Structure formats: structure tokens, C-alpha cells
């Protein structure tokens, strides 16, 4: 990012290059294909000798403008956007891993990511799930064929904070790809590049888009990983400096071949949403802290998971790594309190599975997003049957607190 602040940079990002007719936003270029007056230019673009666009599955001027914004936010080298956060994760692993490889993942993950990694295991790419709050657990799981370590910054839904710096150092020493899902913190609160991440994933559906009106995902190559040491890069993409090789393979073998393309309209919605990320995050963090404190003191609440609380096991780590504790918190209701009754009484807060929306959303975790795991696995992961995840929004703080007070009752 330039020396300018986060919001200034993102607001003026499109104008860093001339925009057609002086438009403030990069226009929505709704074209599946792009034509050339000289057929030689089409060949040159195909062969990567000239910049340009040939076919919308691999990118459009609108999606590339969004990619540039995300790259600036993450202070990275290159970004590839996809149709969802899951598409960004699956496309990247699909492009970079081979049968017989192994990777290490946090055991505390968004449920669909866990499910995806189990599918990779079925395809012959082994995965070890470990507690990543200590780098030593990751180190103990490494094998000669380990290619990658995957962690979330603040885990969804129980908010464990991974030993992000310790794992970064370990991956650096061993020459292993370090892939960090930054969705819950967003590049506004944390830049994984600062702890040595090679690749950063963001679900753009969440805080970056912010308005719950568009789905997307991004993977950013931070430029720190030495791709010349990576055995799985095809000869086709070993062209020019090694810095470009990883992103080239993700774009070609992943985005081009698997096709999880982000449409131009959606790219535009997400780019507009991203302009106010820092403003929204400030309010979200303040609201979440106030709500966490209210819940912690409430007799009907048995436990609150939020890194902003002094009682959180990784509170000190979160304060040293992040510029805010984000808006995801979860709480367990006391024995005998009817979860459905409490959720049913909430008037402002919406029962919904999403997170990172401007509106506050709540969901009972065990029978929904962790349903497929079954009770034994949930217990192993510390997911209480009464656990409610809240994604705190930007409502006026007093309105939000009042809604929880009335729903929980005396
Ligand atoms: N990563 C995290 C941490 C998430 O919470 C989610 C979705 O909730 C995703 C990735 C997937 O994002 P998307 O829903 O855009 O596919």
C-alpha cells in the first residue's frame, strides 16, 4: 500500500490508472470475450507477452480492478479473485497440491473448509488437523512431503487465535507455504504478510464486501514465498522471475481450468463495499466488545468466547497482533436456558448463517453449521450444544445491547 492511509488508498485505487470517461469506479465490463483488431495481439496476450483480456473466465477489467484493491489492502504482490471464499481456498489448493502431498491445517476451522480438506484427503492429499494455538503442534505434524500449512487468524466460531507469528517463522525455516485465512480479521485489522504468510485468503462475502449483497473470495500472494523451491510448479509457469510462478499457476490451473469466476457485476459490488471497510470495522469492534462484556456479566450466559475479553486464552496475543478484535463472538447459554426462546426474542438481531454483514446475525452452531460433524466430533472441538455464534454489525451500540438484554431477560 502507498504511504496513504488504508481508506484513502482503497477509495482512490481505481483512479491510480486512467478510468474510462473519468468515472470514479472501474466500469462493469460485461463481456464474456474480448476482441482484437490485430490477431497478433490476441496471440501475444494469450502467451503472456502483452497485458490484456481474452476470455472472462480468467478475469475482466472489473475483477482485476478489485484484485488490485485487495493486493493493496494486504500489501501483497498479486491477487486472484473467485466466486466465493470457498472457491478461493479450493482453487488454490487444487492448483498447488498433488496426490501424495501432505498439508497441516488448524483443527479449528470454518466447517465447510474442514469438509473440503476431508475431500482432498479422499483424493490422496493427506491432511493433519492440529491445534494451531501453539506452533509446536504444527511442527510435530510436519512430514517430508508437507507442502503447506493452513490457519485462520481468529477461528470461527470459538475465536481461538492461532500462533500466527510462531507458525510463520516455522514455515519460513522449513520452506513451506503458509496460507492464512484472514476473513475474520480482514486486512483492516491484520496483515498476515507481517507474520510471514505466503498466501492470504479472504472471503469477500464477509467484511470486505460488508453489505451481504455479493459473494466472492480472494487469494493474495504476498510475494514472500520462494516459488523456485516449490516442486509442484509446472514448467509452463516457470517463466520470468519465480515471484510470479505461484500466482500464474493458481490463475491458470485453478481459475482458468476449474472456472470459479467472479462476475463483473459482483466484482463491482464488492469493490464499492470495500471502500468503507475501515469505518465499518471500527464500529463493529466497538459493538462486539460492548456485547461481549454484557454477555460475560449476564447470569444466563455460561461462557463467552471473544479475544477482546481479558479471560480469553489468547487475549494478549490478539492485542499484540491485531488492531481490533473483530466482530465474531460466541457464547454458551447456562444450563436450562432455552436457546431457541432467546434467539426468538431478538428483534434486531437476525437468525442467519452469514458473518461480516452490516447487520448483527446470530446462529445456534451445533444443529446448523456444525451439524454434519455429529456430537462426538463437536465435543472434541469444544463446540457446546448451546453455543451461539454472533456476527456483530454496525447498529447503534445501545440498540444492540438493549436487544440482547430484553431477549435474555433479567
Ligand atoms: N473462511 C471463513 C473463515 C469463513 O467464515 C467462510 C464463510 O463463512 C469462508 C472462508 C467461506 O467464504 P464464502 O462463504 O464466501 O465461500
Image (cartoon, helix red, strand yellow):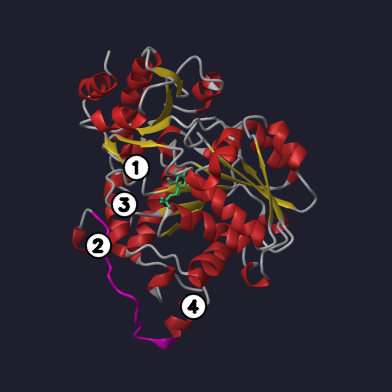
Name the residue located 34 percent from the left edge and 85 percent from the top edge: 37
- The circle drawn on residue 270 is 3
Q: CA distance from mark 3 to mark 4?
A: 28 Å
Residue identifier under label 1: 9
Quadrant housing residue 392: top left
Residue 123 image point, x, y percent? 65, 63
Q: Residue furthest right?
A: 144
Residue 199 shows up from this direction? yes
Badge 4 or badge 1: first in the primary sequence: 1
- The circle drawn on residue 46 is 4
Task: Please tell me whether residue 98 is drawn above or below residue 168 in the rendered image.
Answer: below
Which numbered mark, 1 or 2, is in the foreground of this view?
2
Task: Please tell me whether residue 140 is drawn above or below residue 60 in the rendered image.
Answer: above
Which numbered mark, 3 or 4, is in the foreground of this view?
3
Q: CA distance from mark 4 to mark 1?
A: 31 Å
SS of the residue under disc 3: helix
Given contact means CB atoms under 8 Å apart, are the residues at marks 2 and 3 in contact?
no
Badge 2 or badge 3: first in the primary sequence: 2
Badge 1 or badge 2: first in the primary sequence: 1
**For disc 4, does the CB lie below 8 Å from ligand 1?**
no
| Residue bounds of the magenta highlight | 25-39
Name the residue located 66 percent from the left edge and 31 percent from the top edge: 166
Q: CA distance from mark 2 to mark 3?
A: 13 Å
SS of the residue under disc 1: helix
Residue 129 image point, x, y percent? 65, 43
Residue 1 image point, x, y percent? 43, 42
Quadrant housing residue 196: top right
- The circle drawn on residue 209 is none
Amino acid at each position: 500500500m502507498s504511504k496513504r492511509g488504508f481508506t484513502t488508498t482503497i477509495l482512490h485505487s481505481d483512479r491510480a490508472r486512467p478510468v474510462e470517461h473519468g468515472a470514479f469506479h472501474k466500469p462493469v465490463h460485461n463481456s464474456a470475450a474480448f476482441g482484437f483488431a490485430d490477431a497478433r495481439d490476441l496471440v501475444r496476450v494469450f502467451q503472456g507477452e502483452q497485458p490484456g483480456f481474452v476470455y472472462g473466465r480468467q478475469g475482466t477489467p472489473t475483477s482485476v480492478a478489485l484484485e488490485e484493491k485487495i493486493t493493496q489492502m494486504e500489501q501483497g504482490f498479486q491477487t486472484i479473485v473467485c466466486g466465493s471464499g470457498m472457491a478461493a481456498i479450493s482453487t488454490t489448493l487444487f492448483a498447488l497440491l498433488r496426490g501424495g502431498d501432505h498439508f497441516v491445517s488448524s483443527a479449528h476451522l470454518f466447517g465447510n473448509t474442514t469438509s473440503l480438506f476431508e475431500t482432498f484427503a479422499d483424493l490422496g492429499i493427506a491432511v493433519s488437523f492440529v491445534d494451531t494455538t501453539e506452533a509446536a503442534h504444527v511442527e510435530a505434524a510436519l512430514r517430508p512431503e508437507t507442502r503447506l500449512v493452513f490457519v485462520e487468524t481468529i477461528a470461527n466460531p470459538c475465536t481461538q487465535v492461532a500462533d500466527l507469528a510462531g507458525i510463520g517463522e516455522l514455515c519460513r525455516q522449513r520452506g513451506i507455504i503458509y496460507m492464512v485465512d484472514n476473513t475474520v480479521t480482514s486486512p483492516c485489522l491484520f496483515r498476515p504478510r507481517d507474520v510471514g504468510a505466503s498466501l492470504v485468503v479472504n472471503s469477500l462475502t464477509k467484511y470486505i464486501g460488508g453489505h451481504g449483497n455479493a459473494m466472492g473470495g480472494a487469494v493474495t500472494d504476498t510475494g514472500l514465498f520462494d516459488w523456485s523451491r516449490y516442486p509442484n510448479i509446472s514448467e509452463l509457469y516457470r517463466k520470468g522471475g519465480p515471484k510470479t510462478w505461484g500466482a500464474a499457476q493458481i490463475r491458470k490451473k485453478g481459475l482458468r481450468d476449474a472456472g470459479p469466476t467472479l462476475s463483473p457485476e459482483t466484482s463491482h459490488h464488492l469493490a464499492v463495499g470495500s471502500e468503507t471497510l475501515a469505518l465499518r470495522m471500527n464500529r463493529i469492534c466497538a459493538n462486539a466488545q460492548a456485547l461481549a462484556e454484557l454477555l460475560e456479566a449476564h447470569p444466563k450466559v455460561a461462557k463467552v468466547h471473544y479475544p477482546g475479553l481479558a479471560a480469553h486464552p489468547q487475549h494478549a496475543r490478539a492485542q499484540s497482533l491485531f488492531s481490533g478484535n473483530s466482530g465474531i463472538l460466541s457464547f454458551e447459554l447456562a444450563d436450562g436456558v432455552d436457546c431457541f426462546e432467546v434467539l426468538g426474542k431478538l428483534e434486531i438481531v437476525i437468525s442467519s448463517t452469514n458473518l461480516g454483514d452490516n447487520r448483527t446475525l446470530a446462529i445456534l452452531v451445533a444443529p446448523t453449521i456444525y451439524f454434519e460433524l455429529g456430537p462426538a466430533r463437536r465435543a472434541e472441538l469444544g463446540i457446546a450444544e448451546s453455543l451461539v455464534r454472533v456476527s456483530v454489525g454496525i447498529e447503534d451500540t445501545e440498540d444492540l445491547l438493549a436487544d440482547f438484554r430484553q431477549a435474555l431477560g433479567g
